[in-house]
Structures are given as C-alpha cells and as structure tokens.
Image (cartoon, rainbow, N blue to C red):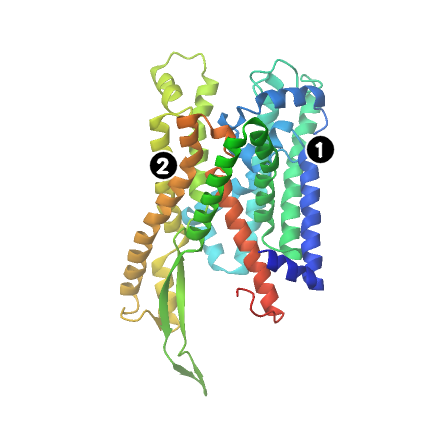
Amino acid sequence: MLTAFTRAFRTPDLRKKLLFTLGIIALFRLGSVLPTPGVHVQNLAACFDQARSGDTGNIYGMVQLFSGGALLKLSVFALGIMPYITASIILQLLVVVIPRLEALKKEGQSGQTKITQYTRYLTIGLAVLQSTAFIALARTGQLFPNCQQDVLLDPDNIFQIVTMVVIMTAGTSVIMWLGELITDRGVGNGMSILIFTQVVAVFPSELANIFQANKFTFAVVMVVGIFMIAAVVFVEQAQRRIPVQYAKRMVGRRMYGGTSTYIPLKVNQAGIIPVIFASSLLYLPQLVTSLFQTSDNVVITWISQNLATGDTPIYMATFFLLIIFFTYFYVSITFNPTEVADNMKKYGGFIPGIRPGRPTAEYLNFVLTRLTAPGALYLGLISMVPIVALAVAGASQNFPFGGTSILIMVGVGLDTVKQIESQLQQRDYEGFLQ
C-alpha cells in the first residue's frame, strides 16, 4: 500500500487527484466540527464530554458512527453520510419491488442516472426528518439525558429551530456534492471515501484514551484489532472463480469468441449492507422503550429487558440471525443467476461441464447459496465482537475496532488501493504486486 501511494505521487496527474481528494477530506472534517448556528457551544461541550461513555448505546448510535462523532456536537455535517446510505438501501430494495425502477435499472447508464437522482431526492427528505428529530431531542434534553444544561441558545425560538434544520439538511447536500467531486476528479469512490473518513476520525482519540487509562488494555486491544483486520482482509479478498468458456462464432468475415474467463463470486458478496440492516432494525426496540419509559405494559417491559441493550443473550442471538437473514436476502436481490445464465447463453458462453440455460442458472444458484453461508457467518461473528466484549468484560467502549468500522475501513481501503493500482498499470508501471 505504501508503494502504491509513493508511485502515485510520482505521477503528476495522479498526484493532483490524490491532493484533491485530501483537500476534500479536510474540508469535510472542517464541516464536521463547525457548530450549527444556535448551538450553545460551552454547554454542548460539557454535555458531550459527559455522554461520551454511553453514546453508542442510544438510538442514534449508527448515525453517530457514520458521522465521525459529529452528531453529538450538532455540527453542520452532524448527519454525516447516513441519510445517503439509508436512501441508497431503500432504492435498492424498491428496484426489486417496483417494476418501473427495475426497468430503469435495465436501461443502462441513463436509467442508473435517474435512480441516482431519486436517491438524492430521498436523501434530502431523510435529512429533513433526521435533523428535525435530533434537534427536537436536543431541545427537550433527551439528546443528553444525564445533562441538565441547555445545548441550544434559545430552545423556544421556532425560527432558530427551522434555521438549524435547514443548515443540517444543506450540510447533507454538500456531503453528497463532495462525494461526487471525489468520484469525478479524485481517487476512489467518493461516498466510500467519506464514510471511511468519518469512521477513522474517532480512532486516534479513542486509542489515546485507552493508552492513558491502561497500557496493558491498549496492548490487548491493538493485538486483537490487528488480528481482526488480517482476518477481514483475508475474507474480503477470498472469492470463488467459476470458469466460463466462449465458443467461436463467425459474424460477417470476422471470428469472435474462443476466449476463457471466469465469474468472480466473493465469499462476502453482500458487503457491509446486512450489518447496517440488522443494526438499524434493532434500534427500533430502543426507540420504543425510550418513547414509553413510564409504561407498565408487559410487552414494553420485555423489550426493555431483552432487546433494548446489547448485553442480553436474546439481543445477541437476534442480531446474529438478522445478519444471516439479510446476507442471504441482499445477495438474492443483487445477483440473479437466471439473468447471468441468459446473458452467457446469448453471447455463446458456457461453464465447462454444465449445459447453457436453466442448468447453468441452477448451478450458479447452488454455488452462490453455499458460498453465502460462510460469508454470513463471517459477518455475524465480526459484528458480534464489540457486543461480546461489552457482555463479558464491559469493554465495548474501550474497543474501537468494532465489526462495522473494521469492515468499512478494510473494504474501502482495499478498493481505493486497487483503483490506484489500476491507474498505475495503465501508465505502464510493471511489477506493482511483486
């Protein structure tokens, strides 16, 4: 990886792209610490320091992760990239349900452009809802339940509240724009780079706090973290390559085909999406219990005791099973064996030993189903690490290498390095992987 960046900086156009990407990241982080007008900065800082030890257990834990700690600071970029992620997931699910969206997806680049536009509109709508919800929590004191100070300068000023909602929503729009700038003029996928930036932004402070508190714990955390990173890299790179042979065919006076290739099926075909789905779904019980804290209902009481916190066996089992379910579900809607088999047959391709058409689709489904099993177990086990640490040793807050953050960091890091490698190879750089 170091060699990749060293050679990239020696190439003038790649150096410009890398410096442009770093500049966008710096601007992004500036917006993440810039407070929204109307926030009482001193009171907010005091409440933030008081809540740091318990923020990940609240209903906004996932948004806090993807905001790089900006949410509890009520900054301009407080919502982070989470509205865009949620909108993208919803659109991917609706493509399977709504025939119009499915037709747009099959239209190629023009259809994908329209779907992207719909994603932007939905992102703005979600940003309005989320910013309104978090400002309402701050106004009523529920954003920091244990802090008695007002975090807003004038909680009863409606104009000020509306202004804060507009600014946070505009911040989300700027984040989308910055991500697209990185994709067009920088290196890597812009949205992925911004997610990566937000996740790693909290690492230095967390590791410094662990080191100051207990050096032995710091050493254990680093060893376990390095082991987890190595395991994630190994699994993320693992794939099953299904050989495909294309028969020779004559078109006019030219001969086409006769080549061999393969279909790469990753062990973790679903990526990080199942973990986000499962985490988001399990925030609903926490939301219910927070809304009905004084209720004596038996169901509310059972939810509060078993699903509102991550240290109960029922919560752990539910989280693990949801990840397995969403992994199979997401793979089934993103990879269609029948469509792949039909495309292969159309262009004269076949898997050696397998007849084209329906037998090929059945074979691909057979391989994919069994390949998804270890991928789902891997996602479940990696995601359970911080929860088990909390239940066994109460160390979740002292373990920054959570499953979701590790998956994001390693996945985005590998993809970015591959893109740099690809651009270097296009400029006749040889022996890059040697």
Side (left or right) of 414 relative to 235: right
Which of the labelled discs sits on residue 257, or is there none? none
Of the pair 363 and 201, the residue shown nearer to us: 201
Q: Residue at x 45, y 16 (%)?
A: 292
Q: Give the CA distance from mark 2 to mark 1.
A: 37 Å
Of the pair 224 and 192, the residue shown nearer to us: 224
Of the pair 28 and 222, the residue shown nearer to us: 222
Q: Quadrant of the N terminus?
A: bottom right
Side (left or right) of 280 relative to 201: left
Which of marks 1 and 2 precedes in the sequence?
1
> Secondary structure under badge 2?
helix
Bin the neighbour count of mark 2 within 10 Å (Cα to Cα): few under 14, some 14-19, many 20 and up.
Answer: many
Q: Position of residue 65 (x, y in %)?
A: 54, 35
Within the image, what quadrant is residue 347 found in? bottom left
Residue 102 visible in image: yes
Within the image, what quadrant is residue 350 found in? bottom left
Contact between marks 2 and 1 (CB within 8 A): the answer is no
Image height check: is 134 above or below 103?
Answer: above
Image height check: is 171 above or below 315?
Answer: below
Image height check: is 252 above or below 90?
Answer: below
Q: Which amino acid type is marked by label 2?
A: Phe
Q: Find disc 2 in the rendering and name its residue.
A: 320
> Secondary structure under badge 1?
loop
Bin the neighbour count of mark 1 within 10 Å (Cα to Cα): few under 14, some 14-19, many 20 and up.
Answer: some
Q: Residue furthest front?
A: 216
Q: Find disc 1 in the rendering and name its residue.
A: 34
Residue 310 visible in image: no
Q: Position of residue 147 (x, y in %)?
A: 60, 16
Of the pair 53 and 272, the residue shown nearer to us: 53
Q: Which amino acid type is marked by label 1?
A: Leu
Image height check: is 168 above or below 295?
Answer: below
Side (left or right) of 252 relative to 177: left
